[in-house]
Amino acid sequence: MTVVEIRNPGLGSARGRIWRSLLRSPLGLTGGVMLAIVMVLGLIAPLIAPYGPAEVHFDAPFQAPGTIGYILGTDDLGRDIFSRMLFGIQVSLQVGFLSVLLAVAVGTPLGLLAGYWRGLDGIISRLTDVTLAFPFLIIAVGLSAISGPSLTNAAIALGIAQIPTMIRVVRGETLRIRETDFVLGAKTMDASGVRIIFSHILPNAVSAIIVQATVIMPVAVIGEALLSFLGLGIQPPTPSLGIMLSDAQQYISRAPTAAIFPGLAIVLICLGFNLFGDALRDALDPTNASRK
Amino acid sequence: MSLPTADAPALLSVRGLEVTFGENPEPVLHSVSFDIRPGERVAIVGQSGSGKSTIIGSILRLLPGDGHITGGSILLDGEDLSRASEQRMRSIRGRRIALVPQDPASNLNPSMRVGAQIADALAASGSRSKAEIDRRVLELMTEAGIPEAERRAKQYPHEFSGGMRQRVLIAIALSREPELLIADEPTSALDVTVQRQILNHLQTLVDAHGTSLLFITHDLGVAADRTDRIIVMSEGRIVEVGTPAEILLSPQEEYTKRLVAAAPTAVAAVRVASASSAVKPGPILEVSHLVKEFKIRGQRGSILKAVDDVSFSVERGTTTAIVGESGSGKTTVARIILGLESATSGTALVDGEGITSSRGRQRRALRRRVQPVFQDPYGSLDPTYSIEKLIDEPLRIFKVGDRRSRQERVAELLDQVALPRTVAQRRPNELSGGQRQRVAIARALALHPELLICDEAVSALDVLVQEQILTLLADLQTELGLSYLFITHDLAVVRQIAHNVVVMKRGRVMEQGATNTVFESPSSDYTRELLSAIPGASLVG
Amino acid sequence: MLNYLATRLWQSIVTLILASMVVFFGVRQLPGDPALAMAGEEATPERLAAIREQLGLNESIITQYVKFVGNMVRGDFGQSTRTGAQVTDLVAATLPVTLWLSAYAIVVAVIVGVLLGVIAERFRGRWPEWMANALALIGLSVPNFWLGILAILYLAVAFGLFPASGYVPISRDPFQGIYHLTLPAIILGTSLAAVIMRQTRASMIETMKTDFVRTARAKGLSRPRVLFRYGLRNSLIVVVTIIGLQLGGLISGAVVTERIFALPGFGKLTLDAVFTRDYPVIQAVVLLITVGYILINLAVDILYSVINPRIRVGGKS
């Protein structure tokens, strides 16, 4: 019997292909660079910030950007905007990652269960509907009314609000994958539901989960800023980009730059995640891969 | 019917056509040239990837994505379409050259009434009144063989069967009485009996209007039955041109010879394995009085009998085929035998034991002896697994051997299905369809099963690859004494591989017996109809 | 069709009941004694007991829940603990502002989003698509309240194009009312427009690649006609569901938009209630938003089933 020859050799692994496709996309690369900058800034904020986030300089309020010692200027209390921004970025990312973690940790198992065992689908769908009926602001209002506004409560409120979409994504993937022949094949060998979920469905759903996480992240970062802006999120003296904007709004005509820089920081974070997420989605899309 | 004379001027004349996609320097069409004369019917035969669909895209100037014509000309009555403006093309599409597309399921707008979609085509000429268009829509639908045109024109595509949708598409294509009709595999998505009706109807209409026909197909038999001239294509080049008789009976090129040999109907090369003497006689699978009912959703109390009192058996070391069209219940039977579905009543016993009725260890032991091979080689292999992990998954699930011995078994299995051992670390998306199906077979063989349930196992493959896989299955049967239950809609495949055949229709067995007996003297009308619908019969039979 | 509607209605009722339970038991988790809050710190134990009796706090939790639902259905939301005003009156005074603002924002977002989405598809790979994509990305990445602050600073204060704040009821003076709401509606609609644009673009690109679009072009139809009759029609079906899903974000956005433009709407009522711990108002606000959300989504689903023939006739989606 002749051995069948393998044509296109050296196509490389799927992972390698995804990375190459990501690196080839200029927008994805831009997003990746933005994220790298933002994350490094957030991580090393305490090392590079010239001042503490709440350090006031009553002798130097409303300094213009470019002033020696205060590169982006100061606010009404003479706090260094650059330093506060660095710590604000750190807090934004913390809240963002916490809420993504919550949405993934709760949404993934529920989505798998709802998609795989149809009996649970109805119950989980109703729970999703109920959660969707409470906008994140309302959840935050409730949480802060019960135990006071805080970073954790903001992250929880934002995370809970994103659980339904995560369930929806994972459930959709599960429904699709459970109908494939390779799952049927595993069933004919009496593989247990748990085994099928962990060895077939979850690995194939991972890319959709990651893409959804990059969608949630900017929503959560903006959500945190919004809650803090309204006084329902982070509480002073913890710095937050939202609080900086809320403060700046009071003396906006006197020092507009105090409102501009924190806003730009939020845009930088969100743009980074959105660009990177889009490129990742394209790279993971099998219909794109086959064209190359 | 008079054949067009050879010296008549060509209606469409393609010269040195070259098409490329994107930045890729390698063209997908290499200097393709052919003519179609008025009233002539020409077939382009080729497998997927041969470039036959690209030719249609070029003529209509509707190439997908970033494809563009990089050389040659397409002359319609002397006018070069390859250089025509979009404006100009619009006045040619539908009016002078019309298209009957391949898949009736996806070619109609799902959110638009059927009548409006036909009217749209008529309105494109712009010179008719609304009332006139409405009248003509009904006329066209009736002509295309759609009963109750007035009522059905107001329906949406999802309310039509596949065959009826294809008739709508034919009505659209003929609406403006084009000079050239391009039919792109117009029936390959339909059942064989419906296929024949539609093709007959299309042919009648084309003949009546004196329209030229360019018929694109992968099926040499259909091409031979329906056209005056056949163009064989492979990898973007024209391999051979000739009349159906020339191509089928005395092919000149090596590729055409292979294609003809593989074409299941033209020459019935029987590959049925001779029963191995090592196998003890007796049935491995006995199905008796099997019934499966489904409740129809949304309609309280109504029940669909998907499988209705089906009985048959598979002898050890032989192949039994279940043949039927979609909706015949053949796949449900396979799913019940595999234990993926439970029967409403009746039994499916493997060596005297039923999978659904057994429990625990006994059930697991039974599972090992029956393994599936599914239709779609793309869907049946988990894309996140390596080939090695795919083949040894059954061994791991059943906790057979240790790492070392499993590795050895994978290598042995790869040898058996004639794949190089080096593929073990590859992933399924790096392999071709035929190679994947070999992996699927290796995986099914991992546990030394006695019975393979092959559900349309070769239908998704091109005809040459199909032949290779069927040969492999026959070889494995002789070598390992395997028994096969082969689920298929393709009678030609049945003839090639099966010792016995069960013909099903709407859940019931119409006829069963030895393949030769059934094929040569069918006892039911339905089987006779199926057999006469096989394309290519006219030349061989 | 009827089957589908019945199922959908039943689901909405279940969701409504569950949501009302969440609100009811959530409010019971709030710190502080409602009787104490009503009577004030100086109240005598007798007075407290009387108020408890009056509020029904001594009855079983199930009786309390049933009474709560009964009151809500009758539109009796109790009194504000801060001002003593009937909550129903407060809601009636503020709700129209928010409804007008949100409706205006949705209209703006749909027009802008769909238009940009169609432009992006029509000019694939050329500069209009890049512009439309960039706008959508910015819309998604920019917090709308920051945009609002900048808009007030530069459009309203510096150039006087729009009023920076203030509200004129549309019922009193439609022109002035709409004029005052224009900037807030644009700001509120930004991110929704971005989401709609991306969805429209994606589904247009998908649709224009389908076989039936190629077949339509093979009929000899012009590209714009194919774009609108075949492409957009199928894409709009998806856009309708997007609006339903984005409603939660829109409500949160409305609260902060009202704050920035000093609009006397539902958002202001909510925030004031939160900061003064005015529990009856919080309870009413949360419940109304939730009920509103569920009802609007029900309406969206019904609309969806009307424009999608596959649901309209068949049973399955």
Image (cartoon, rainbow, N blue to C red):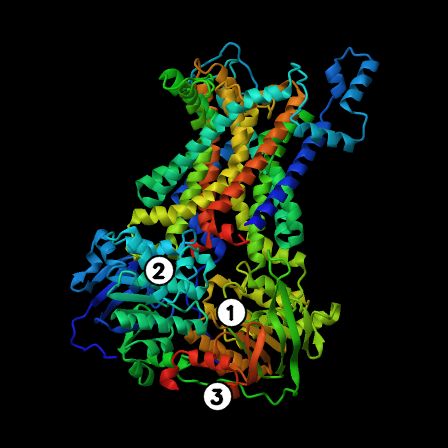
Q: Disc 3 sits on a residue from what chain?
A: B
Left/right placement of residue B426 relative to residue C116 reads right
Give the foreground label among 2 and 3.
2
Q: Disc 1 sits on a residue from what chain?
A: B
Quarter assignment of residue B305: bottom right
Q: Determine whether the residue tagged by mark 3 lies in a helix, strand or loop.
A: helix
As drawn, B478 above or below C85: below
Q: Is residue A105 visible?
A: no
Left/right placement of residue C98 relative to residue B226 reads right
As drawn, B140 above or below C223: below
Distance of label 1 from label 2 (alpha carbons): 30 Å
* Closest to the observer, C57 or B120: B120
Q: Residues within 10 Å of mark 3 (few under 14, many from 20)?
A: few
Q: Determine whether the residue tagged by mark 1 lies in a helix, strand or loop.
A: loop
Q: Which mark is residue B520?
A: 3
Earlier in the chain: of badge 2 and badge 3, it is: 2
Q: Which mark is residue B326?
A: 1
x then y, percent, for residue C218: 30, 57
Q: Which mark is residue A35?
A: none
x then y, percent, for residue B481: 60, 83
Q: Residues within 10 Å of mark 1 (few under 14, many from 20)?
A: some
* Closest to the observer, C99 or A258: C99
Q: Residues within 10 Å of mark 2 (few under 14, many from 20)?
A: many
Earlier in the chain: of badge 1 and badge 2, it is: 2
